[in-house]
Image: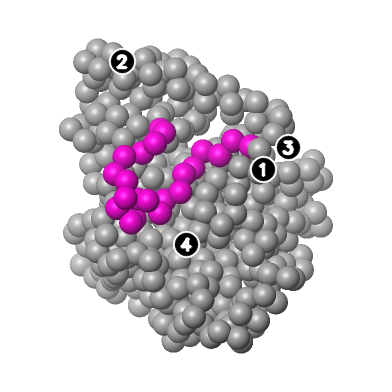
Amino acid sequence: MKSICSWSLLIMIFGCSQIELPPNIILIMADDQGWGDVGYNGHPHLKTPNLDSMVKNGAVFTRFYSAGSVCSPTRASVMTGRHPERMGICGANCGHILTEEITLAELVKQKGYRTGHFGKWHLGTLTKDILDANRGGRQQNDIHYAPPKNHGFDVSFVTESKVPTWDPMITPPKNSGDVNGSLIEGEPFGTYYWSESGMRVIENLEGDDSRIIMDRVIPFIEKAVLDRLPFLSIVWFHAPHLPVLTGEKYKSLYSGLSEDEQEYYGVITALDEQVGRLRNKLKSLNIYDNTLLFYTSDNGPETQKEVREGKIPFGRTRGVTNGLRGRKRSLYEGGIRVPGIVEWPRKIKSGTVINVPCFTSDYFPTIAKILGIDIDKYKRSYDGQDLQPYWSEQKDKRDKPLAFQFKKKYALIDNEFKFMGGAKENSRLYNLITDPSEQVDVSTQYPEKFKSLSNFYRKWHYSVQKSNLGSEY
């Protein structure tokens, strides 16, 4: 409470122009949006004017990565700055965020922030009372009950996991993709929105899901501004995760293309529209200049199961990697390199381009540094680093590699080099600058680099195992 009162008192005494106010913070994440699924990366059809505008007005990361190649692990990295397997989150429905972890919401509340989480949670279950989504309400899974309110969030409007991208509470046609065989079209989808009070939300749930989410984000922001409180708003859209479908307004923008393309591109454009709506609201509230706004995706583009099995040629998963190898669930570039944008007009000059590899684990230490919080006092391993030296162009090299691990496979990205392998495959070394599609193993050409990264991985993996045993709590 002291932090809240002190900021209000300083504003009253000196006025906003006389002091350095803490920034408002918004973290936006799409779901399964590929690195090439944006207009600014040269997509031949896709319209994302608001994301393109963010790039022009802020900084774009040419090599931004999700810390996981599937959803829940990446979300854990955003929330904690730590590799997800340090807390036992090994996949989409594996583990949950532990109470011993320090979350972004708990971090910023030390500085008087109001905190809100909106959209897809996927870091634990949200109810013990009724069947919900993948694990909620099933007695054997009560151990995974971990709603946002238990992790520092004042306000929330969240689902445990995926929902359809249009009319999210209703089961869509099966050709929308990823519709469980037991679900009946037109009946409840079985995954619900929950508020911070633990109640099911039943109003304003028709139409575009991204708009439904933003309808809750904007009042949260307006209330924080009215109360003169800095805020953290985490907005995790479901789009463009399967089931993919949208309204005629958005499909019509892509007339002449196939039905599946119209649906997929329309879903992303509808999401982009809500990003624009949010930015316009920040401007009308006169807080745009001092709002730190990040945008990314949780992993690379999906490949529909029916497509993988050869039953249909393409399906609704039309995401692209712009030639990068691999997709979702892969540690090749296509599975983890994702859109990355940051805006903060007061601090980041427009048109900034960041070529240094960065990833979602960097959010936590960056925000801590901005707010003057020393995270070393928590005495635990952090995998991310402060991003400010990169967007201020003070540094153009990474201090330590980005580390990835998923299902007994691993990868390290050390500036231009990438070291990767697995339990049943040999380690390899790629030069991502000369070989972005990861076709040529250069380990024999750079034996010292190969050896140093191999040693780094062994030490890092041992550190992750220790963390997973709870040694840092």
Looking at the rendered structure, the kind of residue marked 2 is Glu
Q: Which residues are magenta?
A: 380-401
Check disc 1 and report its element: helix, strand or loop: helix
User: Which label's residue is closer to the chain start, 3 or 1?
Assistant: 1
Q: Is residue 397 magenta?
A: yes
| Mark sitting on residue 448 | 2
Residue 240 showing in the rendered view: no
Q: Quadrant of the C terminus?
A: top right
Looking at the rendered structure, the kind of residue marked 1 is Tyr
Left or right: 212 in relation to 195: left
Residue placed at 61% from the left, 64% from the top? 117
Residue tagged 3 = 473
Looking at the rendered structure, the kind of residue marked 4 is Ile
- Above/below status of 294 relative to 366: below
What percent of the width, then of the height, locates residue 79? 58, 51
What percent of the width, then of the height, locates residue 64? 36, 47
User: Which label's residue is closer to the chain start, 4 or 3?
Assistant: 4
Alpha-carbon neighbours of circle 4 within 10 Å: few (<14), some, or many (≥20)? some
Instruction: Tell me how far mark 3 sits from mark 2, CA to CA.
Output: 36 Å
- Above/below status of 432 relative to 106: above
Check disc 2 and report its element: helix, strand or loop: helix
User: Which label's residue is closer to the chain start, 4 or 1?
Assistant: 4
Left or right: 261 in relation to 224: left
Instruction: Tell me how far mark 4 sits from mark 3, CA to CA.
Output: 29 Å
